[in-house]
Amino acid sequence: MPSTEELLRASQRGETSAFAELVRCYERAAIITAHAVLGDFHLAQDAAQEAFLIAHQRLGQVRHAAAFGPWLLRIARRRALRFRRRRTAERTVAGGVDRAAAESSDWMEPYREVVAQIARLPEHERIVVVMRYVDGWSMKEIAEATGRPVGTVTKQLSRAIERLREWLVEVQ
């Protein structure tokens, strides 16, 4: 499989199949990032899709391939925040029940509380957790992608896991 750098450079040259592969690689992380904000699987899919559209339009802004993942996840989070603001405004105007938030995808159900707690993490820790445990990146790959030393990434991940343990124990 080509590296993120190879896929990014090919995408910047206009190769649509390379961008499709980037989408495949980062889709789950983008959906989970958006779901952490929205709490709704279908809206999270929509927000992630918009994030990929924005990323495709702005590919020329990415100078270092290692920055692509965190950059994309920030876009996904911002899209999700925009969706949430719009949904809140619509509920206020309609004065009704938010049925979309009450519905979820079956695969997400066992992870709902974990995703909710991941959403509470500071952004730098949340990105590291998603890259490591959702996308399965190695510590070295995360360090390269975020531009941080491996020791820093390890410490951030360790702190994030400790926070998640504490928060999940509180919930039970």
Image (cartoon, grey):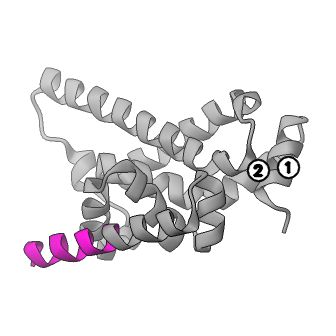
Badges 2 and 1: C-beta atoms under 8 Å apart?
yes
Asked if one can make out residue 134 in the rendered structure from this viewpoint, the answer is: no
Q: Quadrant location of the C terminus?
A: bottom left
Determine the residue positioned at 65% across, 35% down. Answer: 55
Residue at figure coordinates x 80%, y 46% from the top left: 8
Three-letter residue code for mark 1? Ser
Q: Residue at the location (34% across, 35% down)?
A: 81
Position of residue 120 measured from the top left corner of the image (x, y, whole percent): 25, 55
- Quadrant of residue 54 within the rendered picture: top right
Q: Nearer the viewer, residue 91 or 142?
A: 142
Secondary structure beneath label 2: helix
Residue 6 against residue 158 in the figure, above or below:
above
Q: Position of residue 40 (x, y in %)?
A: 32, 52
Q: Could you say whether the residue bearing mark 1 is in a helix, strand or loop?
A: helix
Relative to residue 60, is residue 86 drawn left or right?
Answer: left
For label 2, the crowd category at 10 Å Cα-Cα, with few meaning under 14, some 14 to 19 and many 20 or more, is few
Q: Tell which of 88 and 71 is nearer to you.
A: 71
Which residue carries the number 1 mark?
17
In-image side of 107 versus 67 (left or right): left
Q: Residue 142: image x %, image y %?
A: 59, 63
| Residue that appears at 84% across and 69% down | 1
Residues shaded magenta: 160-172
The answer to which quarter of the image holds residue 102 is bottom left
The amino acid type of the residue labelled 2 equals Ala
Q: Residues within 10 Å of mark 1 (few under 14, many from 20)?
A: few
Look at the image and tell me whether residue 36 can be seen.
Answer: yes
What's the mark number on residue 56?
Answer: none
Q: Is residue 5 magenta?
A: no
In the picture of the structure, the residue carrying the numbered disc 2 is 20
